Image: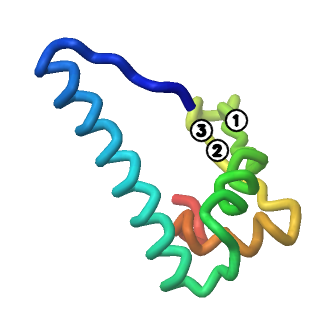
Amino acid sequence: MRPMFHFTERRIEAHICICFIAYKVYKELERIITINKIGMSVDHVLDAAKTITTIRIKMPENSSFFTKTLFLTEKHFAIKPLFQLPDTIF
């Protein structure tokens, strides 16, 4: 972190707006984690989410795409409810 120096009213307001939105997103994620009884902090959830991989394969028969999100570790499975993925792929 370092000090931010803005000299115009527009930049000051934009900076405050970005800070507020970031804080709101953080608190919303914290609320959703609590509702789903994940038992992890926001930072741990974000670290685990960074390692989740999604693959997308183009099928040669009809040029449609097959998408699969891979949950490989216990942490991945712990945060899986946050993704709200359907059980079947259409």
Which residue occupies 70% across, 45% down? Answer: 54
Q: Element at badge 2?
A: strand
What amino acid type should be assigned to the residue bearing mark 1?
Ile
Q: Quadrant of residue 3?
A: top left
Asked if labels 3 and 1 touch by Cβ distance under 8 angstroms, the answer is: yes
Pinpoint residue 69: horizontal percent, then vertical percent: 69, 53
Pinpoint residue 7: horizontal percent, then vertical percent: 21, 13
Query: Does label 1 or label 2 sit earlier along the sequence?
Result: 1
Which residue occupies 67% across, 62% down? Answer: 45
Circle 3 residue = 65
Q: Element at badge 1?
A: strand
Circle 2 residue = 66
Circle 1 residue = 57
User: How far apart are the alpha carbons under marks 3 and 2?
Assistant: 4 Å
Query: Does label 1 or label 3 sit earlier along the sequence?
Result: 1
Location of the N terminus by quadrant is top right
Total marks shown come to 3
Pinpoint residue 36: horizontal percent, then vertical percent: 55, 83
User: How far apart are the alpha carbons under marks 1 and 2?
Assistant: 5 Å
Q: Is residue 77 above or below residue 34?
A: above
Q: Quadrant of residue 11?
A: top left
Question: Within 10 angstroms of label 2, few (less than 14), some, or many (20 or more) residues?
Answer: few
**Residue 23 in sight here:** yes
What amino acid type should be assigned to the residue bearing mark 3?
Phe
| Image-based side of 55 in relation to 18, left or right | right
